[in-house]
Each structure stands twice: as C-alpha cells, then as structure tokens.
Amino acid sequence: MLDAVVVGAGPNGLTAAVELARRGFSVAIFEARDTVGGGARTEELTLPGFRHDPCAAAHPLGINSPAFRALPLERYGLEWLHAGLPMAHPFTDGSAAVLSRSVAETAASFGPRDAGAYRRLVEPFLPKWDTLVRDFMSLPLTSLPRDPVTLARFGLAGLPPSTWLTSRFRDERAKTLFAGLVGHVMAPLNGFATGAIGLVFALAAHARGWPVARGGSQSVSDALAAYLKDLGGEIHTDYEVKRLDDLPPARAYVFDTSPTALAKIADFGNYYENFRYGPGVFKIDYALDGPVPWTAKEARTAGTVQIGADSTEIGNALRAASRENRAPDRPFMITVQPSVVDPTRAPAGKHVFWAYGHVPSGWTGDLTDALERQLERFAPGFRDRVLARATAGPPQLAARNANYVGGDIGTGAVSGLQILLRPKLSLSPYGTPHPAVFICSSATPPGPGVHGMSGHNAAKAVWRRLRQS
C-alpha cells in the first residue's frame, strides 16, 4: 500500500508529492493529461518553433516561493530569466510607470508627488520580506508566524481595499499601476484585502523580480517531476480519476483539483456548495514577426506589461467581468513577452507574446478585436506583426484544464473572505469530510499562482496524519 496518492500533476500536486517523498513516504501521482504541468505548461500553440505558455508565464511568486526555494530545482533544469524590467505600465501619451527591482526607480516613475509615498509604503517590509512571505503564504495554521509583528503591520496596510491604500497617492500613474497589480487576481479594486494583493506583487518584484522560466513554464513542472522521480515517486499520466475506487490503495489521497471535481470524485455531495468561482479570461497567444511596437520605451524591455489607460478604466473592466456579467469594451490586459529575454521561445528574429483580458464566467464570445484595439492604443502597428494567434475563451480553457471552472484560472474567486478562507471557513482548509482525503489546489490558501505553497501546506497536514496513524 502506498503512503500517499496525489491526483493532478500541476505545480501544487507535484510540490505536495515532493514534500511527502522527501520525508520518506511512498508517493504516486495520477494525471489525466498526457504530460505533467497543470497551469505551468509550454506548447507550440501557433506555428512550429514558437513555444507558448497556455496559462502562467511570468513567475513573481514562483521565484519568491519558500517551497520552491527550499528545493534543488536548478539541478533539474529550472533557470529563472529576468528581463530589463519586471513590469511596465504604459500610458497613452507614450510614457510609462514601471515596477523595477529598484524601489527608487519605481518611485521615480510615479513622479515627484508620489515617489515618497511609495517608498514609505514598501520600504518597511523589504528587509523582512523572506520572513513575511513565508508567514503570509503559510497561513492559516500550518505554522506559527515567525514575525507576527511585521505580519500584523502588513495586515493593517493590506486588509483594507486597494482603493483605500492608493488614496495616499496624489497622481494617476501610481494609482493605475497598483490597480493593475490587483487585477492580476481578477479582484474588484474596492474588495477586502485587495491592498495586500497589490503589495505582495510589488514587494515580490523588488525582492527578486518577475522572471520567466528558460524554455517556458513547463520547465517548472518538469523540474519538480524529475526531482520527484529521483526521490522514488511515481508519475502516471493519461489516467483520469472519476471516483476514489479508480485509485490504488493508499493511506492518504491528495487532490490538486477544483473543489467541484473533488466533491464529485469523493462523493462529498454539497460540501463545497458555497465555494465561489471567479470571472473567466479570454487569452490569446501570438506568434509575432518582431517585437511588440510599444510606444513607451520602458515596455520594450519589460517581461510583463499591464494594459489599462488609468485606474478608472481598469476598475470598470474588472467590475464588468466580475459583477455586471459582461465583457468590457476596454478590457484590462496582462501581457507577457518571454522572448524579450529568452531566445529559445521563438525562431531567430521572431517573438512569442502572451495576453489576456477578463470576461464573465463561462463567457462564449470572442474578445479578440477588443483586446487588439487595446494593444493598438499602446503599440500602434501591433496587428501588422501578427503571424498567427491561438485564442482560448472560458470554454476552451476549462476543457484544457478542468480546474479552470468557467475559465477561472485562479480556481476560485479571490474576493471577499474567500481571499483568505478557502475553500471553506475552516481551521483545516486542506482537510475534507474524509479523514484520508485532502485538497491542495489553488482553491486552498494561499491561492492562485505557480508557487507550490498550497501543495507544500497541504503536505504538512498529510504527513502529520500519516505519522499519527
């Protein structure tokens, strides 16, 4: 009998399996797709030689993850690549605000009236970032806070809505960039704890940047899988699990799945009926004949580029998708240009480009024209560079990854109390009604992102049980 079976080979499932195998437990993973990866995959979606990331592409949380940093993933091929700037936010006048590794450079891009306010916001946390991020990403009670005072100060700053936090800024440049940071998790700007979301992304950039993985996000998953195999773990692909009886006998079962899928497989009935999924996304992967012709020079060297003219436009777009059940006329966009720093992603002189905007859950329309009109505002002539595009709306995303219910790439709404208390109000969020069944997906704390911390935290709960039995 195995000690643990993991269902789903996304970053969280792989991390959970690695953490258990490192502690001497026998582990096997069962994955429905033909390769490991989940939200961290790389595929030729458009033309031969153009390697795209169907979901996650830039990894500010990955390089800062306490779980990943404790593992020897670089020995298994993972290499982080840093563009000239972690992120840029261009404006229609050809200028840009930036999120740089340097706090001073970032503050200067906001203008003299807000530079001091930004420094006062982030500088107190940076010296204690490693402890803070471990405490923040290990909540709830998987471990005691190492620095409860700093964590409490962070909570006081971040738990109010981001609109409250950005009220300290006088000009639009800082407000707009910060609104875009909150938009990465598709949360309304006036929601609970959205200030913390923006702060985490900003601090992550200053601490270690927003890199891409050389060769694509698949490199993250492949490194975890290779390490797991060296630890004696087994990986079975093309193995769809429809009920618990489909799995071999084990002392514990760990699911890197949506709560909806787990409830069906384990016959939990309506146990997760109050779990809410968020809006979906409409994503386009481009093969380009050259670099994106950004008007703002800063955007040409940035790994990630946020698109939204101002904080009001961003707020309207997020509200349309999450609360008004309509696709926005001017969508807020997150774009990544991996080939700016990684030439292995496209043929010589060509580029890959990754972009998405928010739409209502399950939306079946085509947002291509609206997204490209937005791009043309900040990169005139963009359409002339397009060699091929691969589009995916909520139905296509959900078909490719069953965790993306309704096209929600976060596997659960990041709003209200569900930002912190997911998938249920519980002191044991990784546990379920069955004492031997656990959940480790992005539906559990700390939530979305390729960081493995949900798997790491769930593994703690599993090994504690295994040692007691």
Image (cartoon, rainbow, N blue to C red):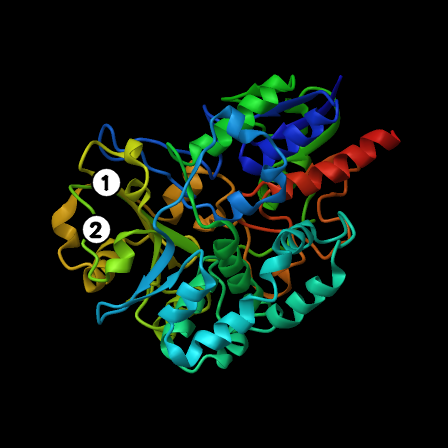
Residue 390 visible at all: no
Label placed on residue 462 = none
Q: Is residue 2 left or right of residue 7?
A: right
Task: Give the residue displayed 55% in from the left and 71% down from the top.
Answer: 121
Q: Amino acid at mark 2?
A: Val
For disc 2, the marked residue is 292
Q: Position of residue 27 (x, y in %)?
A: 68, 22
Circle 1 residue? 351
**Mark 2 or 1 closer to N-term?**
2
56 in relation to 276, above or below: above
Q: Which residue is most to the right?
A: 468
Left or right: 320, with 429 as reference point? left
Residue type at tag 1: His
Quick check: marks 2 and 1 in contact, CB under 8 Å? yes
Q: Nearer the viewer, residue 327 or 195?
A: 195
Residue for point 42% across, 52% down: 362
Which residue is nearer to you in this view: 147 or 228?
147
Tell me, yes or no, if residue 403 can be seen here.
yes
Mark 1 crowdedness (10 Å alpha carbons): few <14, some 14-19, many ≥20: many
Question: Where is residue 295 shown, x and y percent of the image?
Answer: 20, 61
Q: Quick one: SS at disc 2?
A: loop
Badge 2, how many Cα within 10 Å: few under 14, some, many 20+?
Answer: many
| Distance CA(mark 2)–CA(mark 1) | 8 Å
The quarter of the picture where the C terminus appears is top right
Q: Position of residue 111 (x, y in %)?
A: 36, 76
- Residue 122 in which image quadrant: bottom right
Please report the residue visible at 43 percent of the width from the left and 82 percent of the height from the top. 170
- Residue 64: image x %, image y %? 55, 47
Residue at 61%, 34% (x, y): give it. 15
